[in-house]
Image (spheres, coloured by chain):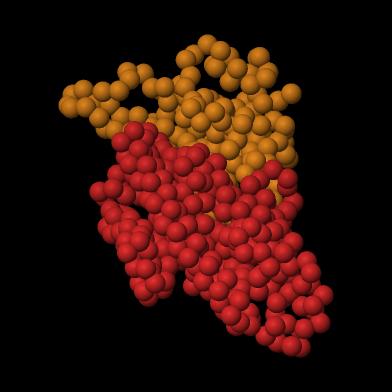
Chain colours: A orange, B red
Amino acid sequence: MTRYVMVIDQRRCIGCHSCTVACRTWNKLPLDIVYNPVVTEGAQGTWPNVHKSWQPLLCMHCENPECVPCCPSGASQQDEDGTVWVDPKKCLSCKVCVNACPYGMRDASHLEDRMHRFVRKCTFCRDKRQLDPDAKPYCVETCHQKARIFGDLDDPNSEVSKLIGSVKTERLFEEFGTDPQIYYIPELGGKA
Amino acid sequence: MKHHYWEPPIALYLFLGGLAGGILFLAAIFNSFVVPGYAEVFALPVLVSLACVAVGCVFLVIDLGQPGVFWRVWTTSKSIIKWGATFLVIAAVFALLFFLAFIGDAWPIFAGLSDFLKPAADFFLIVAGFFGLCIMMYTGIMLSTLKAHAFWATPALPVLFTISAISTGCAAVVLSIGGWPAVISLESLVVSEIVLEILHVVDIVLVIAELIVLLTMVLSFAGAGNVTAKAAALRWVKGSYAGLFWVGMVGLGLVVPLVMYIGGGHSAAATLIAPILVLCGGCLLRFMVVNTDDRAEIPGENRYYNRVAKNDAEFITKWTYGDNQF
């Protein structure tokens, strides 16, 4: 079995937004829809003890996604490798999944013809991986700091397995019980 | 953080769906247990509920991004929305059958159809009433299962929506009972009067119950909710929604009709103005709840989204989807 996850090393992220641009370009996103925003926390503290950190976000590709069972048309679905994606051919754009996601990582597209809208989200570049199973998402390939690490959690020799097994990682909003599969290695130094 | 993916049509639908469910539920209860044998006085209330379902469904469909394929809601078995759509269709079909059983009284051209359907009219109303109850409950349950939104994810919300739906249904029955196509007779007038007297008391109880549930829900969130729910509830109690909440919903939507019901007797205030205020209050409740879709904030998220362009610039639309595609 394969279980794709992403480890995001916040120690390495410098907040350059390259991943956002790569994603936007590949997925041809409208200006106001962002699959992988890089949000800034801070700057906090007083000089000279100031601190700033970046948190790259994307769909958490949860093990128990909130957005899949609520979909009335079966467009929102999860692959066996854990990828959560939306089939535009089935989507009604009723936006219940957009409201169900605790991370706000879905958006209803509005650029298309009024009668043919659908819900969009990050798919770990599913279309690219279908062409080449070893391919990595564009945000991972473009990250020159190697802050985004993509791989198979079920493969004990993969980089993500080794990282998750050896370094302290955090996940976002675990209290919702969604079992998110994006693991953050928090920044050194903690909060100011 | 982006808000309000569900726009006014959805709030209006939640109101109209609940209202229709409430009317059908009350009509079924009264026709089965309180005044059996005078089903024709409920023909107009059922027609009103049919109109509400029809208009509500139109709002639901036009809010979709792909209205032409709305039937896709029936392609999975799990989602609550699918159940809601099923309830709506069944309730509407049986309400229509019930109404057709009495249309012959007003339009003799349909007399044959009405005579054919009339023996089963009580059964039609019972089925419609049961599925009306399901509609009332599902609207609240659907919102309360979306646990990403702290203000919705509470068991109090389905209770509040159900009580509000029956209460608004009560008001609509009060305004419409005994009207066209029922033939006015001494008997139907007496039955209508009996039902009105009972509904008068029922709505007093319901408005008090709604007041209690509403204040409990909002004030307990304001006092003891998690960070997100507390911020949302404080917006209702003393923030930007305070005027609408205290004056509009609690005052004009609940307390004023309550006073009119109790003190008004048979005046126009109790029989006309109070039900209209209850209906407006129910509508306002749905709008305010749907617009309170606060999600727990990821630190820094709001600042990020506030800086993202709100709409597409013309050049990027052309560049991305026009002829200049790479």
Give the vertical position of A80 relative to A108 (above or below). above
- Would residue A187 be seen by someone viewing this image from the given angle? yes
Q: Is residue B114 left or right of residue B178?
A: right
Residue at the outermost top position: A166
| Quarter occupied by the C terminus of chain B | bottom right
- Return the residue nearer the eye: B245 or A62: B245
**Image position of B134 (left or right of B224):** right
Describe residue B257's horizontal placement relative to residue A96 as left or right.
left
Where residue B118 sits: x, y (%)? 77, 72
Q: Quadrant of residue A153?
A: top right
Image location (x, y in percent) of residue A134: 69, 30
Q: Nearer the viewer, residue B222 or A162?
A: B222
Residue A57 is situated, as x and y percent measured from the top left of the image, at 47, 36
Give the mark count: 0
Q: Residue at x 34, y 33 (%)?
A: B224
Residue at 51% from the left image edge and 46% from the top image edge: B158
Q: Position of residue B296 (x, y in %)?
A: 41, 38
Give the residue at x 65% y 74%.
B40
Q: Is residue B39 above or below residue A99?
A: below
Residue B304 showing in the rendered view: no
Give the vertical position of B69 relative to B151 (above or below). below
* Quarter of the rendering containing residue A160: top right
Q: Residue at x 42, y 43 (%)?
A: B151
Which residue occupies the foreground of this view, B69 or B156?
B156
- Of all residues, the one furthest to the left in this rendering is A47
